[in-house]
Amino acid sequence: MQRVQSRRRFLATLSAAGGAGLFGGPASHAQDGRLETTSIRIAKIGGICIVPQYVAGELLRAEGFTDISYVATDAGVPAALALARGEVDFTANFSPPLIITIDAGEPITILAGEHVGCFELFAREGIRGIPDLKGKTVGVQGLGSSQYTFLSGMAAYVGLDPAKDIRWVTSVSPKPMELFADGKIDAFLGFPPEPQELRARNIGHVIFNSAVDRPWSQYFCCMLAGHRDYVRRNPVATKRFVRAIVKATDLCVAQPERVAQRVVDAGFTSRYEHALSTLKEIPYGRWREYDPEDTIRFYALRLRESGFIRATPNRILADGTDWRFLNEIKRELKG
């Protein structure tokens, strides 16, 4: 009964937000054209930084989707490959794994930026910055994970050789965060809800936060991407998906308490305080301000410098991006 009441409150929030003009006016369904499909499959990862897509269900239904499913996958390159294989239609993912997969020739199209910054690097005493990681043990979820590609790029940016200078530690059980908490590794890069949990347990100290530390805070972290064939065959469905997600992103900014409760009720996390902290700490409102093309150029350069990709930024942009839908939505929502 409590979950039903919570869902009703959330629907009331959506209705009130629309009536208040939060989303810039009603969806332009007639202007969009006929919806080609009412089915949509969205990747689901362990992190809650991509919460807009987890609370967008009612917005997607308002856009005409009736068959909405979430498919579990690991974050990073595994999520990008699941998209490329057609196991999901859309994902929100850190941009470097998407760029790496596009460079490999996979059919992925990046459509928009979702939010800025969610990674935090925790370290033991005596480590004050990225250069201090030379010769140290650093825990990440896997060598294809978002954490690994991100920290490798940061290490190369400050002059380290990520393959030689850092001792990478991956583990399924115990997880890298627990290895760090137990003092068995020197540093750990995590994304929500892991940083919130470490802070609550008063473990380690933060030496880097991608939401506030330049230049990383000047670019999108997670971006929306679709399978190239789905996007080409279903342009109306693609636009409506993107519109629902950016509206959900606005809702994260306007009603973080309600959204946090919705995330818990839907089973994406069990800790309300961690969900609320994530919503208040991550800059979800910058999808209107930042240029997603700048993000692709920045990270493509970093990845090329680190040896992860061969293609130029211009090649990645030409082969793997399409900003038409986002630009149309910005005009509609007066962004």
Image (tube, helix red, strand yellow):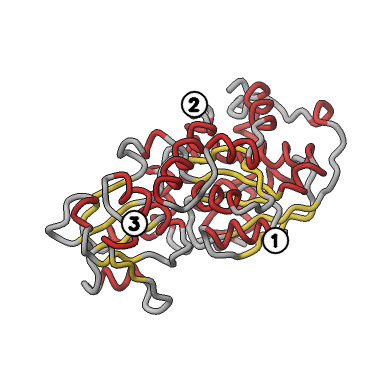
Specify the amino acid type for callout 3. Pro
- Image quadrant occupied by the N terminus: bottom right
Q: Nearer the viewer, residue 148 or 8?
A: 148
Question: 10 Å neighbourhood of mark 2: few (<14), some, or many (≥20)?
Answer: few
Q: N-terminal of the two: label 2 or label 1?
A: 1
Question: 10 Å neighbourhood of mark 3: few (<14), some, or many (≥20)?
Answer: many
Do labels 2 and 3 touch, CB within 8 Å? no
What residue sits right under mark 2 in the picture? 289
Q: Is residue 325 left or right of residue 77?
A: right
What residue sits right under mark 3 in the picture? 195
Mark 2 or mark 1, which is nearer to you?
1
In the rendered image, the vertical position of residue 248 relative to residue 89, given as above or below? above
In the rendered image, the vertical position of residue 171 relative to residue 13, given as above or below? below
Residue name at image x 59 percent, y 36 percent: 317
Q: Secondary structure at mark 1?
A: loop
Q: Is residue 155 left or right of residue 132?
A: right
Specify the amino acid type for callout 1. Arg
What residue sits right under mark 1 in the picture? 85
Specify the amino acid type for callout 2. Glu
Can residue 54 be seen by looking at this rendering?
Answer: no
Report, in whole angstroms, how far the alpha carbon at label 2 lies from the one at label 3: 26 Å
Residue name at image x 75 percent, y 43 percent: 231
Q: N-terminal of the two: label 2 or label 3?
A: 3
In the rendered image, the vertical position of residue 322 relative to residue 276, given as above or below? above
Residue name at image x 61 percent, y 25 percent: 21
Question: 10 Å neighbourhood of mark 1: few (<14), some, or many (≥20)?
Answer: some
Mark 2 or mark 3, which is nearer to you?
2
